[in-house]
Image (cartoon, rainbow, N blue to C red):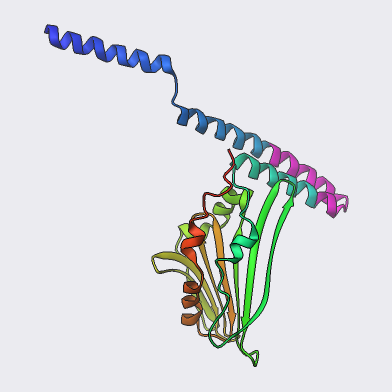
Amino acid sequence: MTHQRYRSFVAALGAVALLAACGPSPEEVARQEAMKKLDQAAKEMEAAGKRAEAAAAKGDVGAAMGEAMKALGGLAGAAGGFDPVDFRKLKEVLPQELPGFEKGESSGEKNNAFGISVSEAKQSFRTPDGSKRVRFEVTDPGSLSGPFALANAWINVEVDKESSEGYEKTSTVGGRKIHEKWDKNDKRGEVQAVVGNRFLVEISAHGIEMTDVKALLGKIDLAKLEAMKGEGKKS
């Protein structure tokens, strides 16, 4: 081994020793802590599930529901999540007028129970004769953001079903993956999209062709909503 190669070899050994002394990176430590929290939450959920089953067996539905909600709240806490965006801000991304339609009910609310915080905003429209109706809705699952993403697994899979009564499928509109359902008999359509891997946008309509229902996504300020995706992040 030449002198230069020997010096390089010693330097490499020194670097390895230094890395070993420094221990795992902050990112690895954070990941390990998160896994520990999720593992503990899973154990607590299992225990809560057994308590809920026992309560249900005794006919105590309220207690059973309470245990189930506490378990879900524990999972939400372990997953981190967010403090939900104020529903008043969520309402700002929804359309306030729709050509040919009259503005209907506008509402918003924030709910917090068993450690689960969720906010939502809604805006509805209808034609003067009531033959066509549209409702826009945006939901911030807040502390359920992690489990919420898993629950809406359709964003990671392909769905394509059709019958004489209508269809259900995933598709892409404006570069964004959506989930759509169409009931031909009732002429009722639904469109869902996840924005910023956090917010759920929903449009439900009656008396309107499905192509027009999907086009209504353009009436929502999705860019403004996506800009909110980091708000209220818990440490």
Q: Name the residue at the bottom extreme.
A: 129
Quarter placement of the C terminus: top right
Quadrant of res 85: bottom right
Q: Is residue 56 left or right of residue 100?
A: right
Q: Is residue 109 above or below residue 95?
A: above
Q: Quick check: is 56 in the magenta stretch? A: yes
Between residue 187 and residue 201, name the one nearer to us: 201
Res 67 seen here: yes
Is residue 1 visible in this depiction of the protein? Answer: no
Q: Residue at x 64, y 56 (%)?
A: 86
Residue positioned 58% across, 86% down in the render: 101
Count of labels shown?
0
Q: What span is colored magenta in the figure?
A: 44-64
- The correct choice, above or below, for 89 with respect to 189 in the image is above
Please identify the residue farthest to the left as the structure is shown.
2
In the rendered image, residue 41, in percent from the top left (x then y), is placed at 65, 38
Main SS class of the magenta portion in the image: helix
Residue 97: quadrant of the picture: bottom right
**Front-most of residues 93 and 24:** 93
Q: Residue at x 54, y 78 (%)?
A: 182
Residue 232 location in percent, x, y? 59, 47
Give above or below for 213 relative to 22: below
Measured from the top left, where is residue 94 in percent x and y?
56, 70
Magenta stretch encompasses residue 62: yes
**In front of the other: 98 or 117:** 98
Question: Is 73 placed left or right of 182 in the picture?
Answer: right
Q: Which residue is painted at 42% across and 64% down in the image?
A: 176
Quadrant including the N terminus: top left
